Amino acid sequence: MKTVHDVVHDVAAAPGRKALRLGPLAWTFRPRIVLVPLAGAALLVLVAALNIGKGSAHLEVLDVLRTLLGGGDRRENGIIFDLRLPRTLAGVLVGAAFGLAGAVFQTIARNPLASPDILGITWGAGVGAVALIVAGGTRGQVSGVVAELGVPLAALGAGLVAGLLLYALSWRRGIDGHRMVLIGIGLSAIGYNAVYWLLTVGDVDDATRATTWLVGNLAGVGWESIGPVAIALAVLVPATLVCAHTMGGLQFGDDTARGLGIRVDAARGTLLLLAAGLAAVATAAAGPITFVALASPQIALRLARTPRPPLVGSMVLGALLTVGADLALRTFAPDLPVGVLTSVLGAPYLIYLFVRSRKGVRA
Amino acid sequence: MTEVRLRAEGVRLGYGDRVVVDDLDLDVVDGSITVIIGPNGCGKSTLLRALGRLLAPRSGAVLLDGKRIDRLPTKEVATVVGLLPQAPSAPEGLTVADLVSRGRQPHQRWYRQWSAGDEEAVSRALSLTGMDVHAERVVDELSGGQRQRAWISMTLAQDTSLLLLDEPITYLDLAHQVDVLDLVHRLHTERGTTVVMVLHDLNLAARYADTLVAMREGRIVAQGPPSEVLSEQLLSDVFDLDAKVLPDPVAGTPLVVPVSAHLSPDRG
């Protein structure tokens, strides 16, 4: 070992980390953290174009891309912008929101099982949305502004309440990931049952409307649902990315994180609410599409080889998984909503995680 | 000149209904190494957690450079006091370089996460512990001694003038124990770092401490230079230990040699 003074005069670049610096700005540069989202985005554009091209009037990928860039004729513009774009755009936005929410939850719970669908946020949001649909149904129709803004707002509010409940119930002088997952599973069960109880109370038409929404469906999404999601994401995504710089420290135990100058409860509480908001907004728009929030952060983590789920990578993979699942289903089983495929994929993955987590593996 | 960096004033500490430390006063002098000793459950770690602002006192106060530590911003405290908890855990797959880089957290903002200063501090911390050669390895694949040195590097990268270490050598073999304590001693002599640590090994405590603080049942029984504190009477009072205290043939500090029951002459 060298003496302190030798070392001071003999400082080499810290190994394994390249820097990206511009004036007062400075970040770590890891090639894979940039490459994974770039490659994912390129693939996403292709899958999205295929998805948009699909339908009674088939459009080629290149034609779709040309039209999106503003070079389409009147017919192409009509088909794409009026009819088909909302569905795919919703898939992109919702998938990105679920991916980011999952990455945040998994990091602060230090557990790969922690995702909004497991933790009760998604079903909490579901309770809000279904309650409004059913209540509106019994007291006159939910329509117009109430339907467009009321349902997303109800889902957002209920999702945040679920997030607060989750945080309050799992807090015992700090957060333990396993306790958080167990409490979340309990909250999920309550939310799930509340939704089905609401369906039996509501009249048949409302129940039918609510059920299509409940499996996670992109088919019915129009421009009117895109607006609220886009606005919510424009606020929540940057806020999450800015707050996320404490996440590296939060991955350690609470004492270590505090020793690093992180106000642990405030930082974790803020991140948890932001992630709950993201998941709730996404659920409000397209229903509880499961598996995306659970899997995309873990896939991104393995591709980028980072110690915790990369945020932008998780968003891109979430979008890719959602639009990809939608495209796959429309190709092979046109009548099924996208939530069915993600559930089918999610169940075995969840069992795999449970088996692994018994061995003490963490996110 | 003896300037007090950290001061506990009549602190009462506890968890839930249990009071662990009551009405305790302690001064930590600038540039000194203070070692807290005492039997299991005497409140050593609890006191250290309070000094590091991890635990708020029920009454009394902890002062950092004369200011109440609980009224200073968390981030500001973390640029002055570095602390290493007992048995910290790292997430799976984290490399040593990543771990040590996290020590820069209190110096960073979301838009300034890896400055030239950060890079320099991390390199320096890695070289000081000799962990620079292992920088690319994953923390959970390291041996116990290497892992502990990695964690100490993280605390060093924080670049603080005060270090609080909770049992930093507990899981290490004797050679690594001496390595780590030598490192602490070098930081103290070459950089003037003020150190407070909890140790179980009385002989190493006596060798490296400027001030030895002996605790029992939440109170300080004795404090001062090891040669004055570590007496046969104190070992009996604090640890209920029957032992001889001899001069350490290497360092000249007190050396504790326990008297075992099966060897005592009056056994029959």
Image (cartoon, coloured by chain):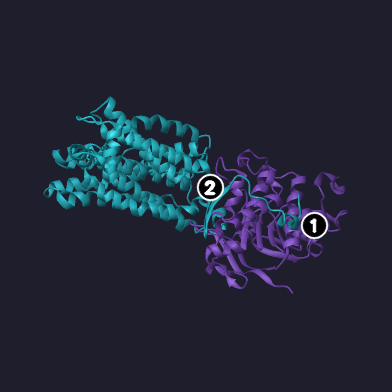
- Residue sitting at x 74%, y 74%: B1
Under mark 2, the amino acid is Phe
In this orientation, which residue lies closer to the viewer: B115 or A300? B115
**Which corner quadrant holds the C terminus of chain B?**
top right
Disc 1 target residue: B207
- Residue sitting at x 19%, y 29%: A56
Q: Which chain is purple?
A: B
- Residue sitting at x 38%, y 35%: A43
Marks 1 and 2: CB-CB under 8 Å?
no
Element type at marker 2? strand
Under mark 1, the amino acid is Arg
In the visual, does A241 lie left or right of A4?
A: left
Name the colour assigned to chain A in the rendering: cyan
Report in which chain the residue with disc 1 lies. Answer: B
Residue extending furthest toward the bottom:
B1
Mark linked to residue A29: 2
Can the viewer see residue B195?
Answer: yes
